[in-house]
Protein backbone atom coordinates (compact mmCIF):
# COMPACT_ATOMS: atom_id res chain seq x y z
CA UNK A 1 0.00 0.00 0.00
CA UNK A 2 1.26 3.48 -0.79
CA UNK A 3 0.00 6.39 1.27
CA UNK A 4 0.44 10.02 0.23
CA UNK A 5 0.92 12.17 3.33
CA UNK A 6 1.55 15.83 4.01
CA UNK A 7 4.22 15.14 6.67
CA UNK A 8 6.30 12.00 5.94
CA UNK A 9 8.47 12.36 9.06
CA UNK A 10 5.44 12.52 11.39
CA UNK A 11 3.79 9.61 9.57
CA UNK A 12 6.96 7.52 9.82
CA UNK A 13 7.15 8.21 13.56
CA UNK A 14 3.47 7.25 13.97
CA UNK A 15 3.68 3.95 12.02
CA UNK A 16 6.93 2.92 13.67
CA UNK A 17 5.71 3.93 17.13
CA UNK A 18 2.37 2.16 16.84
CA UNK A 19 3.35 -0.95 14.86
CA UNK A 20 7.15 -1.10 15.17
CA UNK A 21 7.58 -1.40 11.39
CA UNK A 22 11.23 -1.32 10.26
CA UNK A 23 12.38 0.72 7.28
CA UNK A 24 12.88 -1.66 4.35
CA UNK A 25 13.95 0.86 1.70
CA UNK A 26 14.36 4.62 1.94
CA UNK A 27 13.83 6.23 -1.45
CA UNK A 28 13.76 9.82 -2.73
CA UNK A 29 10.38 11.02 -1.42
CA UNK A 30 9.13 7.66 -0.17
CA UNK A 31 9.91 5.51 2.86
CA UNK A 32 9.05 1.82 2.53
CA UNK A 33 8.16 0.04 5.78
CA UNK A 34 8.30 -3.77 6.00
CA UNK A 35 5.12 -5.49 7.22
CA UNK A 36 5.71 -9.02 8.49
CA UNK A 37 7.98 -11.63 6.94
CA UNK A 38 6.57 -11.62 3.40
CA UNK A 39 6.53 -9.12 0.57
CA UNK A 40 3.95 -6.86 2.21
CA UNK A 41 4.85 -3.23 2.80
CA UNK A 42 3.50 0.23 3.47
CA UNK A 43 5.10 3.03 1.48
CA UNK A 44 4.79 6.54 2.90
CA UNK A 45 5.19 9.16 0.22
CA UNK A 46 5.45 12.88 0.67
CA UNK A 47 4.01 15.25 -1.81
CA UNK A 48 2.43 18.59 -2.28
CA UNK A 49 -0.98 17.15 -1.47
CA UNK A 50 -3.02 18.81 1.24
CA UNK A 51 -5.29 15.78 1.01
CA UNK A 52 -3.45 12.74 2.45
CA UNK A 53 -4.79 9.55 0.90
CA UNK A 54 -4.05 5.99 -0.19
CA UNK A 55 -2.67 6.23 -3.72
CA UNK A 56 -1.87 2.59 -4.46
CA UNK A 57 -2.76 -0.84 -3.12
CA UNK A 58 -2.50 -4.38 -4.41
CA UNK A 59 -3.59 -7.89 -3.54
CA UNK A 60 -1.73 -11.19 -3.66
CA UNK A 61 -3.66 -14.29 -4.72
CA UNK A 62 -2.51 -17.88 -4.63
CA UNK A 63 -3.11 -19.84 -7.86
CA UNK A 64 -4.21 -16.75 -9.81
CA UNK A 65 -3.60 -18.49 -13.14
CA UNK A 66 -5.38 -21.70 -12.10
CA UNK A 67 -8.03 -22.39 -14.82
CA UNK A 68 -10.70 -23.54 -12.31
Image (cartoon, helix red, strand yellow):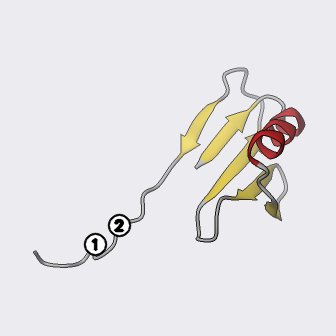
Is residue 36 rendered to the left or right of residue 61?
right
Quadrant of the rendering where the C terminus is positioned: bottom left
Residue 52 at x, y percent in the picture: 67, 27
Q: State the CA–CA distance, disc 1 to disc 2.
A: 6 Å
Picture mark count: 2
Residue 58 at x, y percent in the picture: 46, 55
Report the front residue among 33 and 30. 33
Report the front residue among 27 and 68. 68
- On screen, 58 above or below 11? below
Tag shown at residue 61: 2
Q: Are marks 1 and 2 in contact (CB under 8 Å)?
A: yes
Q: Badge 1: how crowded within 10 Å, few (<14), some, or many (20+)?
A: few
- On screen, 24 above or below 58? below
Residue 23 at x, y percent in the picture: 82, 59
Report the front residue among 14 and 30. 14
Quarter location, residue 54: top right
Residue 21 at x, y percent in the picture: 76, 54
Quarter location, residue 53: top right
Q: Residue at x 83, y 38 (%)?
A: 8
Tag shown at residue 64: 1
Residue at the limit of the structure toward the left, as seen here: 68
Quarter location, residue 60: bottom left
- On screen, 40 above or below 5? below
Is residue 52 rendered to the left or right of residue 63?
right
SS at circle 1: loop
Q: Residue at x 28, y 76 (%)?
A: 63
Q: Badge 2: how crowded within 10 Å, few (<14), some, or many (20+)?
A: few
SS at circle 2: loop
Amino acid sequence: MTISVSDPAASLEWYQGLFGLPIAAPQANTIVLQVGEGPQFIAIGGGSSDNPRITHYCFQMDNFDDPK
